[in-house]
Image (tube, grey):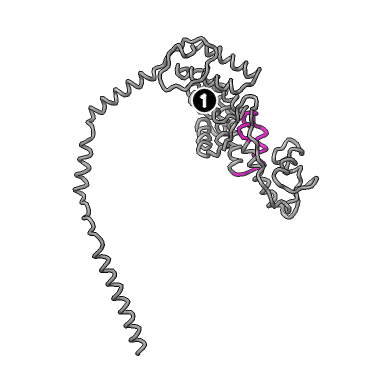
Amino acid sequence: ERWFRFVAALIRNRLSKMLTVQAQTQRKRPATEAPVSIAEHLKKFRASVASLPSSSTWRTKRGRSDSSSSADTRKIVGTSTNLEKPYRRTSFAVEPSQVRSRPTCVRAFLHLKRKWVSAQDYKYVGEQFKSLRQDIRVQGIEDKLAVDIYEANARICLEVGDFSEFNQCQSQLKDLYLLNPNSGNLGEFWCYRILYGTAIRDISTVLAEQVAAHMGTKKSNVKEMYPMVQLAIDIAYAARSRNYVRFFSLMKCCTRHGSLILSQLKWELRFEALKSIVKAFTPGKYPIAEMVRILGFSSNLSGVRWLKQSGAEFDDTFILCQKCTALRPPRVRQRKDVDKGVTHGSLM
């Protein structure tokens, strides 16, 4: 009983101290503002709405801005006959004398194609193509000539690995194909758009193009009408599901330019496949010849060289899975045109 009284007194003492501290804290705290009523909120809202310009004034200003902008972006007709012209970024209206005429653009396009075949100087050809694209854009040329120019420029960009310029070309081609639906290479560059989205892991673009393919044609006829598009869709699905065997099997059916788009993704998937093989077959062995076949190497020598760069342990015939404890992704060197001074970047 004495112990019980002692504990009860201790609890009362602690409670009284807590109540005292709480009361002092409340006295020191500043008084809060009274909540704003709904009527006051409505009053402020009406005042803000009343300060806006009237509908007639807004329409007048909008009409003036639209007319002025249309005047600024009015199409011009070039008069220049210069075959070559350096590219200059402009933020103002250009003079017709500074823009090549349509016949001159045709001759310049043929000249650039001959230059690329003979010299393959990308620094020069790339700048001239940008200048040529600028000339046809300011003149509003959106027919077969524009399609041919953008297609040729896109292929050259893929050959040298300039994916940023390629992306600009293929984005413009998507709009040009809507105006020229009978273009012969529509399926080819549709395929390249899907492969590019796969390479940069842009799943939304890949799915949008896949839906467009099946909505534009019957699902059973996609392969017949656009076989390259169906191939690109299958490659995208194999890459997304990490089906390495099917990915490299389908990649052999790709065009040369399509394989160039997938060049970087190819090396990443090979390394992921190697890790999966080592994990699945440890502590056993895996034949090097089988690895070379399913991962799409051109020869046993190139496969063995890649295994050595990846830190894998192997003998003359087999990969020693249990000893592959220090795997590392091999460094893929960036391509450089030393003579031309052009360094090509990466997709990622």
Q: Residue furthest bottom?
A: 1
Residue 248 lies in the magenta stretch: yes
Left/right placement of residue 5 relative to residue 237 reads: left
Does the rendering let one see residue 10?
A: yes
Given residues 318 and 339, the one toward you in this image is: 339
What segment carries the magenta color?
241-263
Report which quarter residue 270 is drawn in.
top right
Residue 301: percent from left, percent from top: 77, 38
Mark 1 residue crowding within 10 angstroms, few (<14) / some (14–19) / many (20+): many
Given residues 170 and 87, the one toward you in this image is: 87
Given residues 47 and 273, the one toward you in this image is: 47
Q: Residue at x 58, y 38 (%)?
A: 236
Left/right placement of residue 92 relative to residue 217 reads: left
The rendered magenta stretch, by its main secondary structure, is classed as helix
The residue to which callout 1 is attached is 173
Q: Residue at x 33, y 79 (%)?
A: 11
Left/right placement of residue 76 relative to residue 295 reads: left
Report which quarter residue 283 is drawn in.
bottom right
Q: Residue at x 66, y 32 (%)?
A: 253
Residue 302 lies in the magenta stretch: no
Residue 235: percent from left, percent from top: 61, 37
Does the rendering let one see residue 182?
A: no
Q: Is residue 105 above or below residue 280?
A: above
Number of marks drawn: 1
Residue 1: percent from left, percent from top: 35, 90
Residue 35: percent from left, percent from top: 22, 54
